[in-house]
Image (cartoon, grey):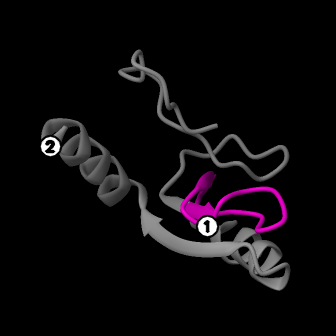
Amino acid sequence: MFPSDENSESTESPICSAKGCRTPAVWVLAWNNPKLHTPQRRKTWLACEEHREHLSSFLDMRGFLKDVVRLTEWQDGARGSAADG
């Protein structure tokens, strides 16, 4: 899973969310289930290059997929948000 607490400075690289995959993540798939979450809420799955399309399709078919962003961009955005606050 994507680290989301204050102690997110970890020595381990985030890994792909695909079942059984241990490959480092390259992509963040931002999604929400409109039946459960407010429109602004974003949950995340991580994906390696191999599983990005499969995981994106799974979420998109259900109408859950909101955005697909490179992990580095997502992390840069999170740092920028923290600095702005």
Image vertical order of residue 17 relative to residue 68, above or below: above
Instruction: Check the image and name the residue furthest to the front.
Output: 38
Mark number for residue 84? 2
Mark number for residue 39? 1
Q: Residue at x 15, y 37 (%)?
A: 83
Image vertical order of residue 82 relative to residue 33, above or below: above
Q: Secondary structure at mark 1?
A: loop
Q: Main secondary structure of the magenta part?
A: loop
Query: Residue 46 vs residue 74: left or right?
Result: right
Mark number for residue 76? none
Query: Residue 80 vs residue 40: left or right?
Result: left
Q: Earlier in the sequence, mark 1 or mark 2?
A: 1
Q: Residue at x 64, y 37 (%)?
A: 1
Q: Marks 2 and 1: in contact by CB < 8 Å? A: no
**What is the total number of numbered labels drawn onto the structure image?**
2
Q: Secondary structure at mark 2?
A: helix
